[in-house]
Amino acid sequence: VEASIPEPQREAWKKFTPKPFTTKEEFGKETVRHIETTLARSLWNCDEGAAYSGTALAFRDRLILDWNKTQQNQTFTDPKRIYYLSLEFLMGRALDNAMLNVGAKDIAREGLADLGFRMEDIIKQEHDAALGNGGLGRLAACFLDSMASLNYPAWGYGLRYRYGIFKQEIVDGYQVEVPDYWLDFNPWEFPRHDITVNIQFYGSVRKWQDEDGKQQSAWENGEIVQAVAYDVPIPGFSTSTTNNLRLWSSKASGGEFDFQKFNSGEYESSVADQQRAETISAVLYPNDNLERGKELRLKQQYFWCAASLFDIVRRFKKTKRSWADFPNQVAIQLNDTHPTLAIPELQRILVDIEGLDWDEAWSIVTKTFGYTNHTVLPEALEKWSVPLMQWLLPRHLQIIYDINLHFLQFVERNFPKDRDLLGRVSIIEESQPKMVRMAYLALIGSHKVNGVAELHSDLIKTTIFRDFVSIYGPDKFTNVTNGITPRRWLHQANPRLSDLIASKLGGHDFLKDLTILHKLEQYVDDKDFRKEWQEIKHANKVRLAKHIKETQGISVNPSALFDIQVKRIHEYKRQQLNIFGVIHRYLQLKSMAPEERKKLVPRVVIFGGKAAPGYWMAKTVIHLINKVGGVINNDKDVGDLLKVIFLEDYNVSKAEIICPASDISEHISTAGTEASGTSNMKFVLNGGLIIGTCDGANIEITREIGESNIFLFGNLAEDVEDLRHSHLYGDYQLDPALNKVFDEIKKGTFGDAGAFTALINGIVEHGDYYLVSDDFASYCKTHELIDEAYKNQEEWLTKSITSVARMGFFSSDRCIDEYAETIWNIEPLMPEKE
Ligand code: CR6
């Protein structure tokens, strides 16, 4: 690689290179310089917002110095890199994370204090980067943190949405969506106007035979949209490795076409073209676990895949290696099926543009890609209509048909005479209209397919991908159980607990090797340690109670049992089971004599989560929770014994306050539906116990922490299908306690009963698909056990400490190391020594 500064001048360059601040004075100087010059503010008008901006810019400068070195080191060493393609990155706030990862939070705190600001207030000024829906997007963010912390040469590729996930407001108990315009001031991104890619849509395919009689194809006459790169530095924890997250933004190409329009007086329509182009990256689709086949979504997917692959191929070509070397230099992980078009796109680049033979190209493609499946829910499996794809991406559709042909021929050779099998595994579903099954394409185009928890990885092999196990054998399938980054979810969210643990384990090394936590078990009987542990939990509950007071105006008692369910609202996650359980508790409480009530354990039941804007049933559940809260919270008979809170606008920064504050959290999906869940890990790592079904990662959490430290209930995944069948064809018996709950709702106790008819009928009339009634009795019983257990605070505390000590497995570092070894075949690249 040629350096742009010639050898003799490099000394001067090095002399002028800025040095990162190391003292509070240097930090203060940098911050004030940014406030005065970059922001054009002065000491007369520096509010907390400006102080945040100045601090963020000072840290950005620091990150970018490390970022430059990391990228340079990668360019010179040219190791195999991993490219993580995800349509969602739910990053949350960046400042606190940057300060902790570079280890300069204390310096900044003192520096800010000298200027008259409190760190806590400054951190709160930042708007969350909320480019994701839920677990899948947050997983991608945890993975970026781990890949940088472990020094893997890794890139994230995504879309730079102008609007992230909507802001949720609750008005009269209903969810209202407000746009999330988050880019007003974003110091964490670097626009790269020099890094652009032209992306084609529509058009036609021209075919011809070249001089050697070889069939050639070219995709022509389409409409061009430009992709512009925005780079976001991702600092590793306690290492100078700073990786890159590249987000693409769409822009009108501004080519001759527009120019012609301009000149011919079609000013308006040329501006309209521009707006249409910018629409591609305008908004994140707000569905979690649901796909709806919208044209704009397919455009987003192709736009992002094509730009990312162009970038990856361009980088590879600079090294002048042979194409056969591509899979030795490049690993691409598909986060769900959203980036599946990258498979036909790479095949197109290799065959149509680079002139490789089909088979040679296909062998490169399949060695390059890995595919992670995140759900077995049928409504979430992506399918795109063939006519739509024919119209938008004509050449890709041909390539997909050719991939399918080769694949089906292979299947036929190995399973002659099994016509049904061919129909079942075909990438093309023979429906009206025909559909492209993206999960099958992703699977066929990858060398490894993984699920995200053991049960889930087993389930995909026996359900949606069953036939493919017969075809390819079991080795193509593997499991990588999800994990979370302990930096954000322990150290940042719960600094006191992190420090207490560090005081026993001789420092914060456990943040880089979470298995070290097991040494905590030695201290489970240490009196002072236990006292401190309990105090920290209480302080975190006080912090959340304060937040509830500030945002909802409701006072809750921090000594009550905090029972929390925060996640997207979805029927399969069963917030309805929870709220029905709350009503059941309320009815019991009301029926007790006042003397009896005094023996009860006071509870605060906290809900939070967004419903997809078009998901009526989920919105009804939010409505019911709010109505129930309105009645119970104002009932004099109840007082402090039961409170029901719906926290508005659940997001990453709120999760950082919520997760450390639970006594119990709820992970109660119908068995076999939640692929993994990751908030279960966050709550347990912060010393909360959980109530859960035998689903997703709950099963492995139980195995690690021990059955006596978790409250499991409900039917098992293996029995779900039979139960559903019996609801429809047997004689169906509604749980009697649940029936009483329904009667109460129908009486109008919680407002207009008609509003909740569909919710009740889904269970009573339409087969109770999610087994709410089947699990109701064991759910309520288990909550009684929780009340009993909570009365014994000493034992509860022992469970809390023991659980945390056994959570080492659930670090996303472990998870990333597993991907690196079993799927990506990549090694860390240590930063150069100073
Ligand atoms: N909705 C799963 O449902 C899992 C995450 C991350 C999900 C959830 O159980 O923890 O992915 N699936 O693997 C999809 O988004 C399709 C999710 O977040």
Image: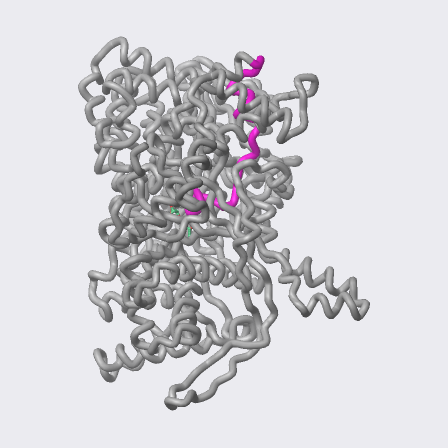
The region drawn magenta spans 115-139
Q: Position of residue 695 (x, y in %)?
A: 32, 45
Taking the view exactly as shown, the residue that stands out farthest to the right is 265
The colour scheme is one colour
Number of callouts: 0
Residue 158: horizontal and vertical position, in percent?
48, 51
Q: Nearer the viewer, residue 536 or 505?
A: 505
Give the camera-side residue of 75 and 15: 15
Q: Nearer the viewer, residue 675 or 624?
A: 675
Seen as rendered, the residue at the extreme front is 8
Q: Residue 766: image x %, image y %?
A: 48, 56
- Look at 46% across and 66% down and name the residue there: 383
Relative placement, left or right, of 94 versus 280 is left
Q: Is residue 171 above or below residue 591?
A: below
Residue that appears at 21% across and 16% down? 523
Q: Is residue 121 magenta?
A: yes
Res 320 visible? yes
Left or right, 416 with respect to 178, comes to left
- Say which quadrant the C terminus sits in: top left
Furthest residue in direction top, as rendered? 528
Q: For residue 698, what is the image quadrant?
A: top left
- Any magenta on residue 37? no
Left-right relation of 449 to 559: left
Instruction: Work out whether 484 lies above or below 210.
Output: above
Q: Relative to 142, say whether 373 is above or below.
A: below
Q: Would residue 693 be visible to someone looking at this image?
A: no
Position in image of residue 214 (x %, y %): 38, 87
**Residue at 28% of width from left, 43% of height from top?**
829
